[in-house]
Amino acid sequence: MNAADTAWIIVATALVLFMTLPGLALFYGGLVRARNVLSVFMHTFTIACLMSVLWLALGYSIAFGDGNAFWGGLGKAFFAGITEDTAAGNLPEVLFAAFQMTFAIITPALIVGAFVERISFAFVCVFSSIWMLVVYAPVVHWIWGGGLLAGEDWSLFANGVNDFAGGIVVHQTAGLAALLLAFFLGPRSDKSKPPHNPGMVMIGAAMLWVGWFGFNGGSELAANGSAAMALTVTHISAATASLTWALWERIRFGKSSLVGIVTGTIAGLASITPASGSVGPVEALIIGGVAGIMCQELCGIVKNALKIDDTLDVFAVHGVGGMFGIIMLAVFGHAGWTEQLGGLLVVGAYTLVATTAIILIVKIFVPLRVSKEDEQQGLDITSHGERAYDMTS
């Protein structure tokens, strides 16, 4: 085990958890109405707790166990055989498992943005738990755990898919699942209200930006020059996408908004995620520059052309951004077209089929959507018996 590598991944693990708690919670919470902000906090916090326990029990073993091409098996369930002295490369395996746990937390938490303000809390808990084990963990195994798409002897592609920190594993899977959930839920009864607290949105986005250094820089699993480059290109892409989003917004609508520029930040971060282990600063500039405009346009396409109320644009920003980054690796010559497009198709098809099945099965037993009356009053009081603000003052 290497002490420097271990120290950096301990920090990176904390940074990635910081992305969800409190970063993503604040980012999403500020975007909804005042009467639903606590429900968003509750969703993200509960998902973090549930995924931690499930990752310990089954998720890590399914993703990184010594199984076959499709899943890792249950040999490492409850971290069986892992002690403080067990190594995974240059790291303690328990630290590697904890680092990957934070990815298993944020991926289903990203989906929250698609269904806020109208979904039942019970459905969120059951769906997220099954989805992480049935969709996320197997896909992790396929790409990062030596499975179907990793370039091993049993791989579909000889060289494997190049997905450094989760363009497919995290952002495509979460983006497609978000789109499906928004479709099955149907639109909110009233979509006219603006974000209740843009300042909260900016604070959450800033936390996500900082935490993303652990997300991408930590994915090198070492304290070296490659990790430093991954961190640097992550920052450049985020900054550039923020600016191009704001510029494009001004061209289209005459003004650049705070919510817009920080959404551009997230688009740039999602887009650079799979490429951050391969590209240089100029390539990151290009990725971020395109992402800021492309993801903004996709927001309108999803809502206006597809007529799907993906409330906080999870698919357009995370799903499209992550897939774009995967493709740009082939454009820049850092990966083969067959591997990158093949990985997108295989994982995309599996995610769509499996997620649809989970939604249809779970909603038989658990209500998918709250009543119109509960939606009108707000989920904070009807689902959780609390209010974020004193509405009488």
Image (tube, grey):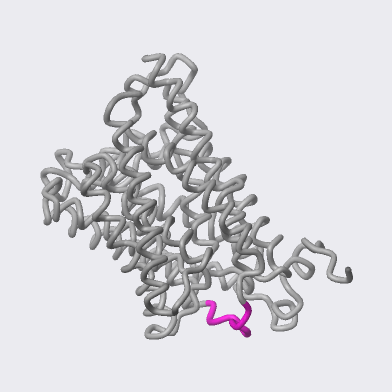
Q: In this view, does 370 lie above or below 45?
A: below
Q: In this view, does 176 lie above or below 1?
A: below
State the image quarter where residue 75 is shown: top left
Task: From the viewer's side, name the closer residue of 17 and 177.
Answer: 17
Task: Residue at 52%, 36% (x, y): give it.
Answer: 56
User: What predominant SS class does the magenta segment belong to?
Assistant: loop
Estimate the x, y position of residue 263 in percent, counting from the top left: 46, 62
Q: In which quarter of the image is the N terminus?
A: top left
**In the picture, which quadrant includes the C terminus?**
bottom right
Place of residue 209 in the rendered image (x, y in percent of width and height, measured from the top left): 47, 47
Q: Position of residue 54 (x, y in %)?
A: 54, 43
The residue at 43%/27% (across/down) is 9
Report the residue at 14% width, 48% height from top. Answer: 335
Magenta region: 185-193
Left or right: where 88 falls relative to 24: left
360 is within the stretch colored magenta: no
